[in-house]
């Protein structure tokens, strides 16, 4: 789980860096309907940049929370820390991912746009299952 949290942080940092030194759009998006950021109205381009920075901030902060909860709380066998890390990751992904499957107004490179976050999600799910098994094994048996 902690490794996936670090991957979320990395994804957010890449997202942030691309805003300033990359295409100006999201990871895996080079144009919007054939337009680059330079082709857009400066106010619109700035607004898109503003949203990308905010999105990167929340991806990074969720990654920090998941990493800290996993590394410090789950390793101490605190069920609340495991549950909080799972809820934080699931809520973020459940809200963000469905939008990618609606009517697509711009072309994504699916591998570079969603591939890294799906890889981190698979790592997170495997870690969450393994951690949950460890938590359950450590619970006292009651009659």
Image (cartoon, rainbow, N blue to C red):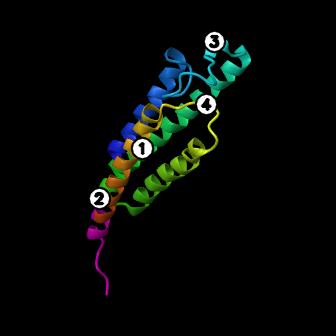
**Decide: marks 1, 2 in contact (CB < 8 A)?**
no
Write down the residue under mark 4: 106
Upstream in sequence: badge 4 or badge 2: 4
Upstream in sequence: badge 4 or badge 1: 4
Upstream in sequence: badge 2 or badge 3: 3
* Residue 113 appears left or right of 130: right
Cα distance, mark 2 to mark 3? 47 Å
Eyeballing the image, is 90 above or below 134? above
**Decide: marks 4, 3 in contact (CB < 8 A)?**
no
Number of the front mark, 2 or 3: 3
Disc 2 element: helix
Cα distance, mark 4 to mark 3? 16 Å
Q: Decide: few, some or many residues near mark 3? Use Cα within 10 Å; few <14, some 14-19, many ≥20.
A: few
Cα distance, mark 1 to mark 2? 18 Å
Cα distance, mark 4 to mark 1? 20 Å
Write down the residue under mark 2: 130
* Residue 78 appears left or right of 134: right
Residue under the image location 48 percent in, 31 percent down:
109
Position in image of residue 76 (x %, y %): 31, 57
Number of the front mark, 4 or 2: 4
């Amino acid at each position: 789980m902690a490794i996936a949290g670090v991957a979320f942080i990395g994804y957010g940092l890449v997202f942030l860096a691309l805003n300033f030194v990359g295409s100006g759009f999201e990871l895996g998006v080079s144009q919007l309907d054939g337009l680059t950021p330079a082709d857009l109205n400066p106010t619109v381009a700035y607004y898109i940049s503003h949203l990308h920075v905010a999105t990167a901030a929340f991806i990074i902060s969720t990654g920090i929370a998941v990493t800290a909860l996993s590394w410090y709380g789950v390793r101490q066998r605190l069920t609340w820390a495991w549950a909080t890390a799972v809820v934080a990751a699931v809520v973020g992904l459940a809200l963000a991912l469905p939008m990618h499957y609606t009517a697509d107004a711009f072309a994504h490179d699916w591998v570079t746009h969603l591939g890294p976050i799906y890889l981190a999600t698979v790592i997170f799910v495997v870690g969450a299952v393994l951690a949950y098994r460890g938590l359950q094994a450590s619970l006292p048996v009651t009659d």
